[in-house]
């Protein structure tokens, strides 16, 4: 796990680590950028580092469908931080339809 994208594990609670690793394993950078500055939030006593923006390609629909429901939610949460506003909006819609 030497790839910098795995630093995004810090954006999720430790109980989601396996799911987050699965999600992160299927995304790739869009260019030389990976993610921008992270801000810290306190979530149930855990400090999470949420990226301002991420610069990764979304996985294919078949890859997305291969994920569990929980992994799809992790992916949608991650892509609400995407640099493209249309991608952010679509992932917000996907999350809201799962609740």
Image (tube, rainbow, N blue to C red):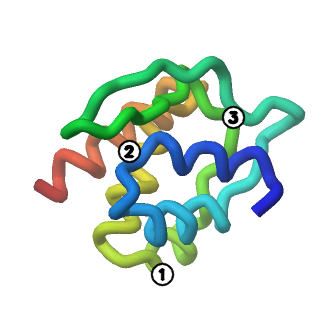
Q: Give the residue number, with chain letter if any, for mark 2.
A: 77
What is the spatial separation of the Cα atoms under label 1 and label 3, in whole angstroms?
A: 22 Å
Residue 90 image point, x, y percent: 38, 41
Q: Nearer the viewer, residue 32 or 43?
A: 43
Disc 2 on helix, strand or loop?
A: helix
Q: In which quarter of the image is the C terminus?
A: bottom left
Q: Nearer the viewer, residue 34 or 38?
A: 38
Disc 3 on helix, strand or loop?
A: loop
Instruction: Judge whether 52 appears above or below 75 on screen.
Output: above
Judge the density around disc 2: few (<14), some (14-19), many (≥20) Cα neighbours within 10 Å.
Answer: some
Residue 49 image point, x, y percent: 48, 31
Judge the density around disc 1: few (<14), some (14-19), many (≥20) Cα neighbours within 10 Å.
Answer: few
Q: Which of disc 3 and disc 1 is earlier in sequence?
A: 3
- Point 82% across, 57% down: residue: 2
Q: Which residue lies furthest to the bottom in this view?
A: 66
What's the mark number on residue 55?
3
Q: Total label count? A: 3
Q: Nearer the viewer, residue 47 or 69?
A: 47
Residue 29 image point, x, y percent: 77, 45
Q: Give the residue number, with chain letter if any, for mark 1.
A: 66
Instruction: Judge whether 63 appears above or below 77 on screen.
Output: below
What is the spatial separation of the Cα atoms under label 2 and label 3, in whole angstroms?
A: 14 Å
What is the spatial separation of the Cα atoms under label 2 and label 1, in whole angstroms?
A: 17 Å
């Amino acid at each position: 796990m030497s790839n910098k994208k795995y630093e995004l594990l810090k954006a999720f609670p430790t109980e989601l680590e396996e799911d987050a690793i699965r999600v992160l394993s299927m995304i790739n950078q869009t260019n030389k950028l990976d993610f921008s500055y992270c801000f810290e939030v306190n979530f149930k006593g855990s400090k999470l580092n949420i990226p301002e923006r991420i610069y990764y390609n979304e996985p294919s629909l078949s890859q997305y469908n291969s994920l569990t429901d929980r992994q799809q939610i992790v992916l949608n949460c991650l892509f609400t931080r995407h640099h493209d506003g249309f991608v952010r909006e679509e992932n917000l819609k996907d999350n809201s339809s799962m609740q």
